[in-house]
Amino acid sequence: MLNLFYASGTSAMAPHILLEDSGLNFSVEKVNLDTKTWQQGDYNQINEKSYVPTLQTQANTYLTECAVILAYIDRQADHRYSFAQNSSNYWQLRIWMNYIASELHKNFISPFRKGNWLPNTADSKRLVWQRVAPRLQFVESHFAGPWLMGNKFTVADPYLFVMTNWMQRLDYPLERFHNLVQFDTRMRQVPSVKAVLQIEGAPHSLTEKSDH
Ligand SMILES: N[C@@H](CCC(=O)N[C@@H](CS)C(=O)NCC(=O)O)C(=O)O
């Protein structure tokens, strides 16, 4: 059975949503990112990169990197969330996944924060926004609707939702991103998203860590 290591409100929410949506059999393990522990002890023994998500696929087999975990779940779900291999949409989706991972996800992470998490001071929030806003603008202008790539709900949608959720959480100005705001609202109506938001509950705290 698949076992997802997550912390609430982090990028691990993307595979959590996809697993829930897919109907695949899975369980979850909550990780405390401040102490880097889970219910059986040291989380770094599970993922030495010391971050979430991690997907356990067999007794001693663990996948890391959000985009790869999403691709793995898609494969287990008979490619329901992607396009026929080598079609132009297939490559376009891969471009989006790489873009979300490297241009959005990592740029949301504050360089001033101990650990590897969202900005939590006025200065770091401002500097992160300087990097993130133009990249979000690119998504805004190329957003097909109703989902990122049009009528098909793909692996990119729960990943993008992590970012729109962070925009709300960090109270960034959303007015100019009409498509993204509508997308965020639409996502919150999807049963798997509702379920995951409820299961995960309050997001992992943004308070400063001292263990790094
Ligand atoms: N390259 C990784 C980045 C994962 C990542 O940054 N995870 C954050 C949460 S979104 C985390 O667990 N940070 C560890 C910490 O804050 O201590 C991926 O794509 O999965």
Image: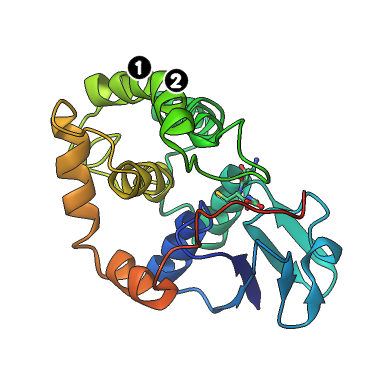
Q: Amino acid at mark 2?
A: Arg
Mark 1 residue crowding within 10 angstroms, few (<14) / some (14–19) / many (20+)? few
Q: Amino acid at mark 1?
A: Pro
Where is residue 106, by image quadrant? top right
Mark 2 residue crowding within 10 angstroms, few (<14) / some (14–19) / many (20+)? some
Q: Disc 2 on helix, strand or loop?
A: helix
Q: Residue furthest bottom?
A: 39
Q: Disc 1 on helix, strand or loop?
A: helix
Where is residue 125, by image quadrant? top left
In whole angstroms, how far apart are the C-alphas of marks 2 and 1?
7 Å
Q: Is mark 1 within 8 Å of ligand 1?
A: no
Answer whether labels 2 and 1 touch (C-beta < 8 Å). yes
Indicate left or right for 57 with 20 as reference.
right
Q: Relative to the observer, which residue lies in front, 136 or 144?
A: 136
183 is higher (above) or lower (below) than 111: below
**Residue at x 43%, y 46% (from the top left corner):** 159
Q: Tag count in the figure?
A: 2
Indicate the position of residue 178 as horizontal and vertical percent values: 13, 32
Disc 1 target residue: 134
* Quadrant including the N terminus: bottom right
**Residue at x 57%, y 45% (from the top left corner):** 117
Indicate the position of residue 102 as horizontal and vertical percent values: 56, 28
Disc 2 target residue: 131
